[in-house]
Amino acid sequence: MAVHEWLLAELTGAVEDTGVRAAWIKVSTDDDDPTGLSADEAKILRAAARAGAETGAAIGSHTLHGDVVQQQLDVIEDAGYSADRFIWIHAQADDAAHHEAVAERGAYVEYDWIGGDDQDDECYLDLIERMLDAGHRDRLLLSQDRGWYDPSEPDGGEQRPYTYLPETFLPKLRDRVGEEAVERLTEDNPFDAYAR
C-alpha cells in the first residue's frame, strides 16, 4: 500500500484494528541536517499533503530548523495543500526570525519543551510576546513534551508531570500578556489547528 493510501485509510477509517480514526498527520525531519529535506522526507510529506487535502487533517512536523520548515511548506503547497494546515513542532529550537517568517506564510508555530531543561520560562515568555507583538497570536501553539517513560529505567525513570504548563507557566504568561491572549493560545488556537 502506498504511503498516501495508508494515511488516507487511517484518517477516514481507523488506525490498524483499533477502531480509532486518526485525527492528524505527524511527520519529522532529520534533527542533524539543517540544510534540507531528504528525498524520503519529501516523498512522505507529499503523501501527507495529498491525504491532508482530501481530509482536512493537519500536518504536524518535528522539525528543528526553520529553513527546512520553509522547504516543507513549499512541498505542501506544491502538492495542493495549504500552509495554514501545517504545525511546526519544536520551533523554539531555532531563531525567532524563522518563527515570524513561518507564521507569515500561515503555518502554526509551536513552542515545545516548556518546563524542560533546555530553556527557562523567561525565554519562552519573550518568544511568545515577540510573536504576539508581531501580530501572530492566531498562529502560535504551546506544548510541554512531558511525561517520558524509559523502559530501561526502574519504574520508567523520572516522570515529569503534565501539570507544569497550567500550574506554573500559564500564570506567568497571564501576568505578561493577559487572560485574553492566554485563552487564544490555549483554547482557540489548538481547536483551530487540529479541527478538520
Image (cartoon, helix red, strand yellow):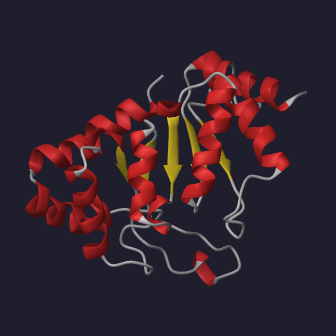
How many numbered marks are there?
0
Residue at screen point 28% across, 53% down? 131
The reply, left or right, for residue 153 in relation to residue 141 is right
Q: Position of residue 193 (x, y in %)?
A: 42, 34
The reply, left or right, for residue 55 in relation to residue 129 is right
Is residue 19 visible in the rendered image? The answer is no
The reply, left or right, for residue 155 in relation to residue 129 is right
Q: Quadrant of residue 2?
A: top right
Q: Position of residue 41 (x, y in %)?
A: 77, 47
Residue at screen point 24% across, 66% down? 125
Q: Nearer the viewer, residue 69 or 85?
A: 69
* Relative to 3, residue 178 above or below: below
Quadrant including the N terminus: top right
Q: Nearer the viewer, residue 67 or 107?
A: 67
* Relative to 65, residue 69 above or below: above
Q: Quadrant of residue 34?
A: bottom right
Residue at screen point 77% across, 43% down? 42
Q: Position of residue 65 (x, y in %)?
A: 58, 61
